[in-house]
């Protein structure tokens, strides 16, 4: 990815996408609290793949994104609130940021699907307008942020994917379509498994800490 940013994880892109989305769809609640952010990450609709993100996981993703200046933290009342800084960091117009958000939240989309999915955040005049911003993102001098995927068999349009997590698992345009279809089928499953592994690692860490504390109170030495 052509900026100083490393490849973001699935969880980091989900958190960033939710912050961008909610800024436009629920401005009265923005910046978001941690609870609101987690709810947005775990939505069952308009999300692919569907995740089960814990508060601890979301906080870790926020802390990582703050390190890249993509997220800013502020104190509002008795709780911290979070907002994104995507446009400034990546030097993008708001329309491009919105397109990236939909791709982060929903996975690869055609230009037509993106126009519909973006409607609550920005009303693109037509599909050619969407394609114009996508082409700018793909040809960005500082480095491409999206890429067009191989058109699936029977599909009329090729889909676009973001590159904030590095090259997509699916084949890019020009490759054989059969591997691309197979990768598309397994992409959501792989992403969901990674999220579950991260959740389990967090839970195991908490259990180890609890065990060490109990053993310490009982005077039992642990290896």
Image (tube, helix red, strand yellow):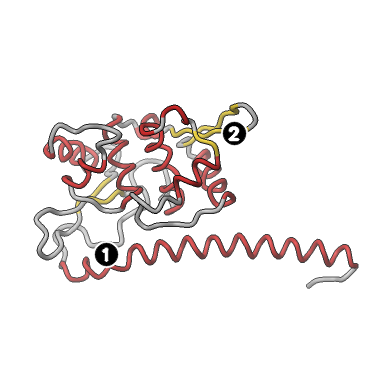
* Viewer-closest of 35 and 186: 35
Q: Find residue 180 and report its image quarter.
A: bottom left
Q: Find residue 18 and report its image quarter.
A: top left
Q: Position of residue 52 (x, y in %)?
A: 48, 57
Query: In this rendering, is residue 64 above or below 213?
Result: above
Helix, strand or loop under label 1: helix
Q: Is residue 150 left or right of residue 58?
A: left
Please tell me which of labels 1 and 2 falls first in the chain: 2
Query: In this rendering, is residue 25 above or below 42?
Result: above
Q: Is residue 19 left or right of residue 119?
A: right
* x 86%, y 64%: residue: 216
State the separation of the CA atoms marked 1 and 2: 37 Å
Mark 1 sits on what residue? 184
Query: In this rendering, is residue 25 above or below 2?
Result: above
Figure quadrant of the C terminus: bottom right
Which class describes the residues within 10 Å of circle 2: few (<14), some (14-19), or many (20+)? few
Q: Is residue 193 left or right of residue 171?
A: right
Q: Position of residue 69 (x, y in %)?
A: 48, 35
Q: Nearer the viewer, mark 1 or mark 2?
A: 2
Which class describes the residues within 10 Å of circle 1: few (<14), some (14-19), or many (20+)? some
Is label 1 in contact with label 2 (beta carbons under 8 Å)? no
* x 42%, y 48%: residue: 14
- Mark number displayed over residue 80: 2
Query: In this rendering, is residue 128 above or below 185?
Result: above
Helix, strand or loop under label 2: strand
* Viewer-closest of 161 and 48: 48
Q: Find residue 213 and report its image quarter.
A: bottom right
Q: Position of residue 38 (x, y in %)?
A: 50, 46
Most distant residue in the bottom direction:
223
- Mark number displayed over residue 52: none
């Amino acid at each position: 990815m052509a900026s100083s940013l490393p490849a973001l994880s699935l969880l980091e892109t989900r958190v960033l996408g939710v912050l961008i989305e909610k800024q436009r769809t629920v401005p009265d609640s923005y910046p978001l609290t941690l609870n609101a952010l987690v709810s947005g990450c775990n939505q069952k609709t308009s999300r692919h793949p569907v995740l089960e993100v814990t508060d601890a996981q979301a906080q870790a993703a926020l802390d990582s994104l703050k390190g890249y200046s993509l997220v800013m933290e502020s104190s509002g009342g008795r709780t911290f609130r979070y907002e994104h800084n995507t446009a400034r960091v990546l030097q993008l117009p708001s329309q491009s940021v919105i397109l990236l958000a939909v791709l982060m939240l929903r996975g690869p989309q055609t230009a037509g699907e993106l126009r519909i999915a973006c409607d609550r955040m920005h009303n693109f005049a037509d599909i050619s307008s969407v394609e114009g911003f996508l082409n700018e993102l793909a040809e960005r001098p500082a480095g491409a942020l999206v890429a067009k995927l191989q058109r699936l068999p029977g599909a009329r349009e090729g889909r676009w994917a973001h590159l904030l997590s590095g090259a997509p698992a699916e084949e890019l345009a020009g490759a054989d379509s059969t591997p691309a279809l197979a990768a598309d089928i397994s992409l959501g499953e792989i992403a969901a498994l990674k999220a579950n592994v991260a959740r389990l690692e967090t839970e195991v860490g908490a259990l180890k800490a609890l065990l060490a504390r109990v053993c310490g109170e009982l005077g039992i030495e642990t290896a």
